[in-house]
Image (cartoon, rainbow, N blue to C red):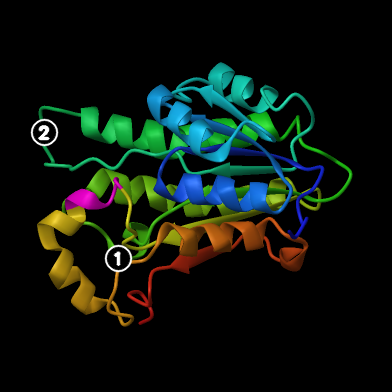
Amino acid sequence: MPSTFTGKRIVVTGGAGGIGLETVKGFMDHGGHVIMADIDEAALERAQAQLGRVRLGTIASALDTPAECARVIEAAGAPVYALVHLAGLFEQDELNPDDHGVWNRAIAANLTNAYDMAVAFSTRFDRREPARIVLTSSVAYRRGSATRVSYAAAKGGIVGLTRALSRKLAPDVLVNAIAPGLIETKMAAPVVAERGEAYMQEIPLKRIGKPSEVASVIRFLCSPDASYITGQTITVDGGITNA
């Protein structure tokens, strides 16, 4: 089995989700030691039962304070080579003038926690070689989302955060983001139910993406092959935003 990440510790937030699970598995298959963080304790237990306990640790966290984010990084028990931040909230936004909650939750769970995780990582990363941060945006930041305005705004913020961090942390840390399109995950299920067929007709590849197809891009961005890539947002969407 390839050993690209042998001896490297990698923290993956949202690790028990669809993309997260494939990402964790890919790092482990290539020799990495992974700390999987997720808010869902039951999902963490299922993931550990599936993937085993060798080179895999789990930690339950809502990532809702800087202290919690620091606790997740420290759970690695040693300097961390890569932070992959997949945790997020995908909530419908009715633009209710009497309820600011959707906006507040979208920013907190999709943008603020990314900032806090990056800050925690910035003092605890492995300095033997350029470390990596991969954040998660979405095609929603490019196309907009009529039903999830707050989410789209937060994911646009991730792109700005990625660019700024890539300058702030250079040359010691390479910082990039992924922007998935419609992927076969529990989070995307409401969109598939609402307008899956119509959406699919807009995708040049005429299908929904697989979690493994996003995980492979994340793994690439953390690998030596991506040693001259930083500040970028890589879209993984089957071509829907190619124009």
Q: In screen coordinates, is 83 left or right of 93? A: right
Q: Is residue 198 magenta?
A: no
**Could you say which is closer to the camera, residue 226 or residue 166?**
226
How crowded pointer 1 is (Cα within 10 Å; few <14, some 14-19, many 20+) is rated as few
The residue that mark 2 highlights is 97
Q: Main secondary structure of the magenta part?
A: loop
Q: Quadrant of residue 126?
A: top right
Q: Quadrant of the C terminus?
A: bottom left
- Label 2 residue SS: loop
> Given this view, does label 1 or label 2 mark the residue nearer the observer?
1
Amino acid marked by disc 1: Arg
Residue 191 image point, x, y percent: 19, 55
Residue drawn 63% across and 22% down?
Answer: 70
| Residue extent of the magenta highlight | 186-190
**Could you say which is closer to the camera, residue 47 or residue 237?**
47
Say if 229 sits above or below 80 in the image. Answer: below
Residue drawn 33% across and 51% down?
Answer: 185
Q: Quadrant of the N terminus?
A: bottom right
Q: How far apart in space, not on screen, are marks 1 and 2 (Cα)? A: 24 Å
The residue that mark 1 highlights is 143
Task: Tell me how many marks there are.
Answer: 2
The numbered mark, 1 or 2, whose residue comes first in the sequence reads: 2
Say if 121 sits above or below 146 in the image. Answer: above
